[in-house]
Amino acid sequence: MKDIVIISASPRKGGNSDLLCDQFMKGALEAGHKVEKISLHDKNIHPCLGCGACQNTHACVQKDDMAAILGRLIAADVIVMATPVYFYTMSAQMKTFIDRTVPRYTEISGKEFYFIAAAADSNKKALERTIDGFRGFTDCLDKVKEKGVLLAPGVWKKGDVMGSEAMNQAFAMGRNV
């Protein structure tokens, strides 16, 4: 059994990338894993101040929900990062989240990562820039393993992803962690 944390950066509950997270979770739970989905839209996470205080203390001076989330990332075996694609990159919620891992990012090592991106653009290649952004984050971590990437192009309106092959892929990806 693996401990899985899913980070959903959709600002819309039930948005396309959020629904893919639910499918991934369903598959992983069916396989007997421990799974927690963290929806960033429900959390109070402020942007990084760039103050550098955390370099000495390994704690952020801001008192919001990020410290608890960071503790969960460190404890997890598997991290799933999912975002809608806005202007060919990750959502502001995901970027803010990544930036706020700075106080303890060196402790996020040896993890397995899965990336999920959903976009209105129907060209899968257009979503690659977002995945490159995720890889920019994981390139700063030690001994991580990228285990899977799921691209869901052509889904714009809330719920467009329902019934798509991407939903089956998300379930299978979770099932096969």
Image (cartoon, grey):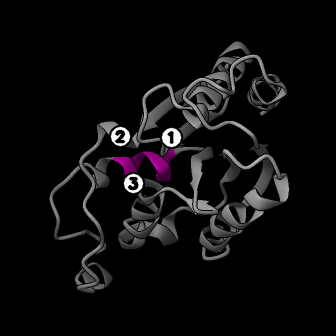
- Mark 1 vs mark 3: give the one in front: 1
Could you tell me what secondary structure mostly forms the magenta stretch? helix
Of residues 129 and 61, which is closer to you in this image?
A: 129
Density class for disc 2 (Cα within 10 Å; few <14, some 14-19, many ≥20) is some
Of residues 91 and 22, which is closer to you in this image?
A: 91
Left or right: where does residue 48 sit relative to residue 124?
Answer: left
Judge whether residue 108 is colored magenta.
no
Residue 8 numbered mark, or none:
1
Quadrant for residue 39, please give it: top left
For the point 79% across and 30% down, the residue is 166
Give x and y (percent) for residue 102. 40, 73
C-alpha distance separating marks 1 and 2: 8 Å
Amino acid, disc 3? Leu
Residue position for label 3: 70
Density class for disc 1 (Cα within 10 Å; few <14, some 14-19, many ≥20) is many
Which badge, 2 or 3, comes first in the chain's sequence?
A: 2
